[in-house]
Image: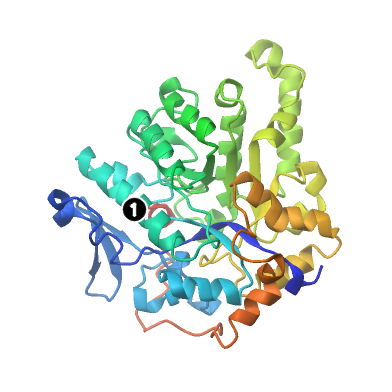
Amino acid sequence: MHAEDLILVSVDDHLVEPPTMFDGRLPAKFADQAPKVHRKRDGSDVWMFNGAKIPNIGLNAVAGRPREEYGIEPTAFDEMRPGCWDIDDRVKDMNAGGVLGSMCFPSFPGFSGRVFSAADDKDLALAVLRAYNDWHVDEWCGSYAGRFIPMGLPVLWDPHLAAAEVRRLAKKGVHSLTFTENPATLGLPSFHDPHWNPLWQALCDEGVVLSIHLGSSGQLAVTSPDAPIDVMITLQPMNICAAAADLLWSRVIKDYPAMRIALSEGGTGWIPYFLDRVDRTYEMHHLWTGQNFGDRRPSDVFREHFLTCFIADPVGIQLRHAIGIDNISWECDYPHSDSSWPDAPEELARVAADVPDGELNKISYENASRWYSFDPFAHRTREQCTVGALRAEAAGHDVSTRSYDKGRFTRATKGADLGALAAKATA
């Protein structure tokens, strides 16, 4: 399939929250305690909430920037493409990149909202979290009907409140809840604890997917403090592999057979080996470990419950049938450093050159639409949804690579403590 004929729905993009997002959205008694953006003396912008300063990590917002300027130093809003944080410019960037639909994970609250859950005043935390969710659904997603898959932040500190928020959001059309890849690292009960039962039940009742993004546990795989940062970046998908194993062997899927789980930004090339390994583990050990999947293998259960995604994964494309052609979806990852925006359609067309059109449609938009209850043609004809049609709408929109570096960056990653950098990158 030619790049201009593709229809693209990305199940993993990101937004940088604009400074005004909480204006008028909190009860009066909490207005003075709302998260706010502060400009530091070095020119970087940080969010401030509950006594904490949360920077915008550079790698989170480098779309349109030359690669030699990549880094994880905190950045200012005027050092990012406006599409990172402005909804009107985001849609222009989507059109220019040929992306019809997008699901956007949060930035400063952490991928699972743990910044809010850390607040001592849980009434404040709940008010802020609900305000965030309403802003995301009503303003970010609601500004352009049919262009976004809305996603909710979870109430991590109370499973009953978490369930109530899932049900509240489901009434607003939300079918995705971002969640941590490992609750235990956040000091919470693990996936194996019945503590989370009310949340699992709500997700199943409302048809909401548990979307787990790598790094959402607050930890990334780091071999040693003096290892090159390339080691951490390379090992990031291992966090998702660990989460997949944890959930597949847990009681969650057995007790909640309608549970659906998405593994976000983890890639797909590792999955065939993973499935071989879990089947072998089951065959050799289930009689003494007590695991019981009836007449099915763990790999069958995985394909029933898990959605995977990739940015550019030639190995995964080659092994797509060993993964499960109905379990793979595409992501753009805008505006993160792994994204190939605005040339993602060309990249996908190139790595999938030998994939039949029917299979490529599943990967590029059909699987995502089915899993997340998203109708790509609800507001546009099919012909208006292609890469070529969207790019025609964006004619004249500047997508050129240009420097946003104002001289503040000193390549602080070189020689820095990798453990500290990893903590910053997942803050």
Q: Which color scheme is applied?
A: rainbow
Q: Is residue 182 above or below residue 364?
A: above
The residue depicted at 76 percent of the width and 23 percent of the height is: 296
Q: Is residue 292 above or below residue 151?
A: above
Q: How many marks?
A: 1
Q: Position of residue 86 (x, y in %)?
A: 41, 71
Label 1 environment density (alpha carbons within 10 Å; few <14, some 14–19, many ≥20) = many
Q: Position of residue 271 (x, y in %)?
A: 71, 43
> Most extreme residue toward the bottom, as rendered?
396
Tell me if 53 is positioned left or right of 256 in this view.
Answer: left
Tell me if 66 is positioned left or right of 58 in this view.
Answer: right
Residue type of the residue flagged with mark 1: Tyr
Q: Position of residue 248 (x, y in %)?
A: 62, 30
The residue depicted at 55 percent of the width and 44 percent of the height is: 239
Tell me if 37 is positioned left or right of 421 in this view.
Answer: left
Q: Which residue is mark 1?
A: 132
The residue depicted at 61 percent of the width and 41 percent of the height is: 241
The residue depicted at 70 percent of the width and 17 percent of the height is: 285
Q: Secondary structure at mark 1?
A: helix
Tell me if I can see residue 127 in this picture: yes
Locate residue 251: give its quadrant.
top right
For the N terminus, which image quadrant?
bottom right
Q: Position of residue 181 (x, y in %)?
A: 50, 40
Tell me if I can see residue 409 in this picture: no
For this rendering, which residue is in front, 337 or 285?
337
For this rendering, which residue is in front, 238 or 298?
298
Locate residue 82: give its quadrant.
bottom left
Q: Is residue 427 above or below residue 322?
A: below
